[in-house]
Amino acid sequence: MSRGLQQELETALGAVVEDMRLAATQLVSVLEAERDALAGADATALDVIGERKQSLMQQLEQLDIERLQLIQNAPFAGAVEPVWQQVVKALQTCRDMNQRNGVLVGQRLGQVRRALAVLTGRNGDTGVYGPSGELHPALQSHRLAQV
């Protein structure tokens, strides 16, 4: 492989890793905003944040595919290592924040289920959500046939 092509691949890899760093940093901010929206029970903000979070995740997935293709075509460029470490650290932070936000969602869901149980007079632990989002009481066995 010529030195010019090698340099071009290293430059492309550096650009992709930098784009990943920027997207991961943005995702950290989005997850912080999600935490605030969850704490404030702001459903409108959660919708907007959810769309942005999904967009950033798709962007990161696409960039990682590009990164892997570049690495296959050229030996690893050591110049991107510091930026790559920043990407890894930001993604670990995102994982932790997402898990924490998931705990908040679980707590909120438990509160809603308990409130529904009080309002409906049913045990909140029985039931499933149907395809359109309505809560159905747990199904019980029914006789299908008699011999």
Image (cartoon, grey):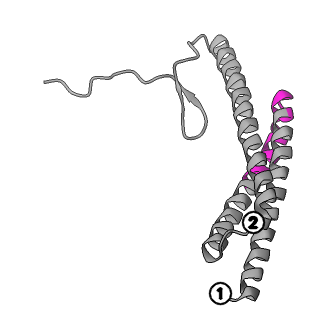
Q: Which amino acid does label 2 sit on?
A: Gly
Q: Name the residue under label 1.
A: 1
Q: In this view, does 26 lie above or below 143?
A: below
Mark 2 and mark 1 in contact (Cβ < 8 Å)? no
Residue located 72% across and 52% down the image: 54
Magenta highlight on residue 52? yes
Question: Tag 2, which secondary structure?
Answer: helix
Q: Is residue 24 left or right of residue 137?
A: right
Where is residue 6 shown, x and y percent of the image? 72, 82
Q: Is residue 21 left or right of residue 64?
A: right
Residue located 79% across and 76% down the image: 11
Quarter where residue 56 is shown: bottom right
Q: Name the residue under label 2.
A: 78
For label 1, the crowd category at 10 Å Cα-Cα, with few meaning under 14, some 14 to 19 and many 20 or more, is few
Residue located 86% across and 40% down the image: 33
Where is residue 51 shown, x and y percent of the image? 76, 51
Q: Quadrant of the C terminus?
A: top left
Q: In this view, does 103 lie to the left or right of 86?
A: left
Magenta highlight on residue 2? no
User: Majority secondary structure of the magenta segment?
Assistant: helix
Quarter where residue 79 is shown: bottom right
The answer to which of marks 1 and 2 sits earlier in the sequence is 1
Q: What residue type is labelled 1?
A: Met
What range is drawn magenta here? 36-54
Where is residue 26 shown, x and y percent of the image? 85, 51
Q: Which residue lies furthest to the left in this view?
A: 147
Q: In this view, does 136 lie to the left or right of 22?
A: left
